[in-house]
Amino acid sequence: MDAAQLTAPAQSTALLTDRYELTMLQAALQSGAARRRSVFEVFTRRLPEGRRYGVTAGTGRVLDAIEAFRFDTPQLDWLSDQGVVDDTTLAWLADYRFGGDVRGYGEGECYFPGSPLMVVEGSFAEAVILETVILSILNYDSAIAAAASRMSAAAGGRPLIEMGARRAHEQAAVSAARAAYVAGFSATSDLQAGFRYGLPTTGTSAHAFTLLHDSERDAFTAQIASMGRGTTLLIDTYDLAEAVRTAIEVAGPELGAVRIDSGDLLMLAHRVRRQLDELGAEKTRITVTSDLDEYAIAALGSAPVDGYGVGTSLVTGSGQPTCAMVYKLVARAASDDPDAPLVPVAKRSAGGKASRGGRKWGARRLDQDGVAEAEVVGTGPVPADLADRLLQVPLITGGTVVGREPLLAARERHLRSRAQLPISATQLSKGEPVIPTDYLIPAEPAL
Amino acid sequence: MDAAQLTAPAQSTALLTDRYELTMLQAALQSGAARRRSVFEVFTRRLPEGRRYGVTAGTGRVLDAIEAFRFDTPQLDWLSDQGVVDDTTLAWLADYRFGGDVRGYGEGECYFPGSPLMVVEGSFAEAVILETVILSILNYDSAIAAAASRMSAAAGGRPLIEMGARRAHEQAAVSAARAAYVAGFSATSDLQAGFRYGLPTTGTSAHAFTLLHDSERDAFTAQIASMGRGTTLLIDTYDLAEAVRTAIEVAGPELGAVRIDSGDLLMLAHRVRRQLDELGAEKTRITVTSDLDEYAIAALGSAPVDGYGVGTSLVTGSGQPTCAMVYKLVARAASDDPDAPLVPVAKRSAGGKASRGGRKWGARRLDQDGVAEAEVVGTGPVPADLADRLLQVPLITGGTVVGREPLLAARERHLRSRAQLPISATQLSKGEPVIPTDYLIPAEPAL
């Protein structure tokens, strides 16, 4: 998978941007403030309601998107025609390459309210215009990964197949498959996700294939003839018991698997397992699909089920289709002087949404048993006992991507990070974040 | 906008497909059934919980996607390397061009449970492999349009700006902006949506811009100097009343607009309006943003607000981020004989998800006052009184796109269609579909 993962996409991401980023850029270029060194931070004030932890995902895609953030001629011509920005700004955009630094939580890492998930540092100009695309990616991918993580915890060791492409935007579906893999899914039905990211792809058959043929027997025979006995036959188009009988008659007891896509899956799985066993097909697996979510997966824990296919609920974040991550200026140069020191800044109106200024680090404090007990977010020096618990890693240094990694590394990081949380983290019922966030930020934050 | 809308995208959509479509294709090519003329129907068994009508959206994008559904060499090589399908199937895919017919509800049209939203007819082979990409597009875009329609009804005549890109997958965001426009939004913050679809784009300024400067006054001065007095100043970074005073001092009473992005928007809008009026800025508009949804928009109906910016809630379908549309084989040739007549087919297992066979039309029956009273779904001959109320239009004929239209036409169709529904359609509280679906389908459906 690494080869595909290591290839950056060619398509420009530069217009995946809110118009105000470019008009702010123009105004700041004119006022001179655009040159001020600036620190933007991605964080979230809260987890989605009732969730006990969040999952960082999309980090690798952010790196691809920043590399592909280049304005080409048709884009510049369009911005000019539309009068979005002036010629000075257009010239600046034409030469745009991000030359700053990005640090962030490793992909797959769990996070909590206030975790400084990504820190983007450069001139105001070069950093501000990345806001929209960075947030789009992290907010969507992390929402999917959070749902996927709950599902993979609920599934225990049983394999989960992502098959929600039809219920998500066609391009979002590809990213959803990737994020699900990071959070513990085994495979996807989405071919583009296989092609683009090297994910394992898999599939079974649809009711249409059975209905196309003159009988279920004809359909099963055709599928076995073409795909071999290891295939998965869909058995709920007509009568389930008859379908199982026909399936084993046609394929023999070497049939790979059957899929049940409707009805009371718990009861039906038991019944089908019994029938398969009676027919000597003890090794034929049972895959279930049909509007599964983490609760349904958990409820099937005692059923003789060998794998779950999950669609709608996964690609919509199981009720939480986005995260509330924001991209905030937390520090900037004290003046237009290139050597000016950084000063912390923060919104402080009365209407809520206040934030903490200063460039932050995040660390996970463990108790003596190695179980996480707090997310610690601070500015300035890191206490000695947290020095090896820091969660940010270098992602881009001086404009060069340094943090790209195989997707498998993110997947392993997630499973490791989740395993370190208190055991109630994977409880499915609604609750508070499983560990508190402690702030080590002085009244006048250090930088 | 028409020029942009009329350009098909170059990027191949062929792998935005579930793996089982291609393996079913392989098995059907081998069994010979792949040649059977087949009719697939997109419909939904139910509206999202509590919704009173659905909105068809994404139709134009489906046409683009079908035109771009071509397998290129790297894709074919990958399918071959992965062993997804055999060489016969690869050769078939290499030549793939959809040559069949597509009819469907016009984009923007309202729909109800059972509405035959799109009918795809061709050989099984050419039609089955379009399932995933068609459903992805229609399910996502229609979910966004349904939410947008509720918001535009709630906003009355006030303009709505889509600004949710940061809370959606970066490519989904572009489609969300498009769907929102279809359902009555006026503009978007997403530049790619402007570039790709010709949508009007707009924007204001972020807190970061204010924080970047040494004072709010410096920031306002910089923005006015660069963007002119017609710009929109963001006034809630520090103290609202002071910001309004500063804004008018800097810009004069000709200031275009102010934006409030936090707090009790109802109360603050009144307060800011009063202050602006006292300062002689009677024409300065007030735009509000901050987690608005259709309920918050409705609640601000009496506030002196001139426009709404909507983000998260729009791009996540306001609690319903997808629709439950499915793509089902409803009829196919009785045999492999090329002249065989079509026969209706339908899943009929006990586990729910049963469907009605036969190629269907949909019509909206109006009462004597011209108000919709039923969605009529039938097979066979159309009753005379419904002949001019049919809702499907030709989209692709013999492989050629015939149904492309400017986005404005879809927008107008939506507003017309919604206006024809009973007045309780736009009631925001949960309820049943505002009109029932009547089926005119004999026990043995005609075709």
Image (cartoon, coloured by chain):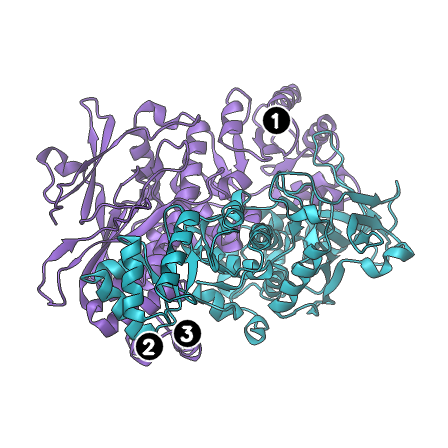
Chain colours: A purple, B cyan
Q: Is residue B368 left or right of residue B192?
A: right
Q: What's the chain of the residue with tag 3? A: A
Q: Residues within 10 Å of mark 3 (few under 14, many from 20)?
A: some
| C-beta proximity under 8 Å, tags 2 and 1 | no
Q: Could you say where residue B373 lies in the image, as x and y percent from the top left?
A: 79, 48
The residue that disc 3 covers is: A75
N-terminal label among 3 and 1: 3
Mark 2 or 1, which is nearer the eye? 2
- For badge 3, the amino acid type reads Gln
Q: Nearer the viewer, residue B297 or A420?
A: B297
- For badge 1, the amino acid type reads Leu
Q: Could you say where residue A123 lies in the image, as x and y percent from the top left?
A: 21, 64
Q: Nearer the viewer, residue A196 or B101?
A: B101
Residue A361 vs A386, above or below: the answer is below
**Would residue A178 be visible to someone looking at this image?**
yes
Q: Is residue A173 left or right of residue B225?
A: right
Mark 3 or 1, which is nearer the eye? 3
Residue drawn 32% across and 80% down?
A87
Tag on residue A404? none
N-terminal label among 3 and 2: 3
The residue that disc 1 covers is: A265
Alpha carbon separation for disc pair 3 and 2: 10 Å
The N terminus of chain B - image quarter: bottom right
Residue A350 vs A332, above or below: the answer is above
Residue sitting at the far front: B278
Q: Could you say where residue A330 lies in the image, as x and y percent from the top left?
A: 22, 52
Q: What's the chain of the residue with tag 1? A: A
Q: Is residue B88 left or right of residue A305?
A: right
Which structural element holds mark 1?
Answer: helix
The residue that disc 2 covers is: A90
